[in-house]
Amino acid sequence: MIDKFIRVNQAGETAAVTIYKGQMAVLGGDPELRELLTHMRDQEVVHLDIMDKHIVDYRVRPTLLQPVAAIGGYILGVVSAMLGTKSAMTCTEAVETRIGMHYNDQLRDLHLLKHEQLEELKKTIAKCRDEELEHLDTAVDHGARMAPLYKMQFEFIKNGCSVAIWLCQRI
Ligand SMILES: [Fe+2]
Ligand SMILES: [Fe+2]
């Protein structure tokens, strides 16, 4: 179970970093957006560092889909940003909604296990979860829900995340 958790989390944080990089490549010309995206990207880089460390500490095999996560994230970032700032924010809201649920599911399972060694893992997952939910709020504050075809974009990306989570846990 721990293997699965760490494997999928590393892939997810890899994609998170590249989503923001992709969005920045398109929208980075605007100073306000650049600052916002840089802040969120920097937090994702810290999350990824944490997950990379877990991979080593718990001797977990990374998913074979790591390169797919990186490239897929970048493409999602670029395409969502090309649809406009609000669609970029819809993308962030959808991704962070799904990832917030994902981390909460993991925390619920981990709380059932009483082992000293798992305390750090619980703490870091909770920290990541809190920051993902901040990103979600930031996206909503920046017009995520005013994007054209908001509901469709939101559901499409959120369901895509569910498929990616399922795959990365198993492959
Ligand atoms: Fe993250
Ligand atoms: Fe995030």
Image (spheres, rainbow, N blue to C red):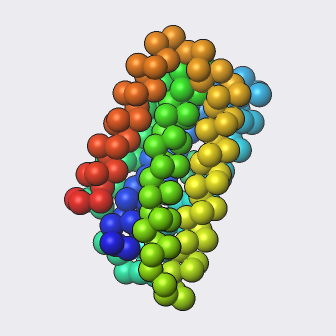
**Would you identify the image quadrant in which residue 20 lies?**
top right
Between 154 and 114, the residue placed more toward the observer is 114
* Residue located 40% across and 27% down the image: 155
Residue 108 appears in view? yes
Specify the quadrant that holds the N terminus: bottom left
Q: Residue furthest left?
A: 171
Give coordinates of residue 29: x percent, y percent. 68, 24
Residue 111 vs 74, above or below: the answer is: below
Give coordinates of residue 142: x percent, y percent. 69, 25
Q: Residue furthest top?
A: 148
Residue 122 vs 78, above or below: the answer is: below
Between 140 and 112, the residue placed more toward the observer is 112
Residue 68 vs 5, above or below: the answer is: above
Give coordinates of residue 156: x percent, y percent. 37, 27
Residue 45 appears in view? no
Count of marks placed on residues: 0
* Residue located 49% across and 34% down the image: 94
* Residue located 45% across and 26% down the image: 154
28 relative to 154 in the view: left or right: right
**Would you identify the image quadrant in which residue 86 lies?**
top right
Give coordinates of residue 87: x percent, y percent. 53, 21
